[in-house]
Image (spheres, rainbow, N blue to C red):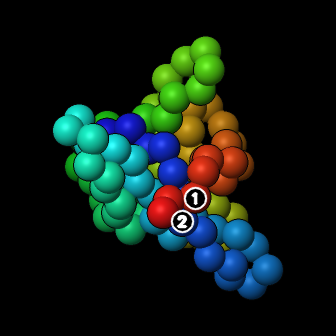
Amino acid sequence: MRISCVNTQWVGGIEEISGVGGTERDGSPWTSPVGAVIAAIQDGRPYFVLTPVQALLVSVYVDAAGRKRLKAGFDEDDARLLRLARCA
């Protein structure tokens, strides 16, 4: 599934991804809570984002506080995902 947008929330002064979304093959939009996407990735379902030069696989990492979060490619955190458009 291609991720092309994110929803965020502020928690303790830090912007966190609360959901992601994109467009189905038929053109209809989809959104999903971040927890469901993390579970799907851990079950083997691939998600990716497109940049102008490449497709980056989205994976799960554990932050310093022990929370599971999403990241793109070899990034160390979710900064690249946070730069995506906001889901409508």
Under mark 2, the amino acid is Asn
For image coordinates 38% across by 38% down, the residue present is 2
For image coordinates 34% across by 44% down, the residue present is 23
The foreground one among 79 and 27 is 27
Q: Position of residue 6 (x, y in %)?
A: 53, 57
Q: From this viewpoint, is residue 31 visible?
A: yes
Q: Quadrant of the N terminus?
A: top left
Residue indicated by mark 2: 7
Q: CA distance from mark 1 to mark 2?
A: 6 Å
Mark carried by residue 42 = none
Dot 1 crowding, Cα within 10 Å, few <14, some 14–19, many 20+ = some
* Figure check: 46 above or below 36: above
Mark carried by residue 86 = 1
Dot 2 crowding, Cα within 10 Å, few <14, some 14–19, many 20+ = many
For image coordinates 48% across by 63% down, the residue present is 88
Q: Secondary structure at mark 2?
A: strand
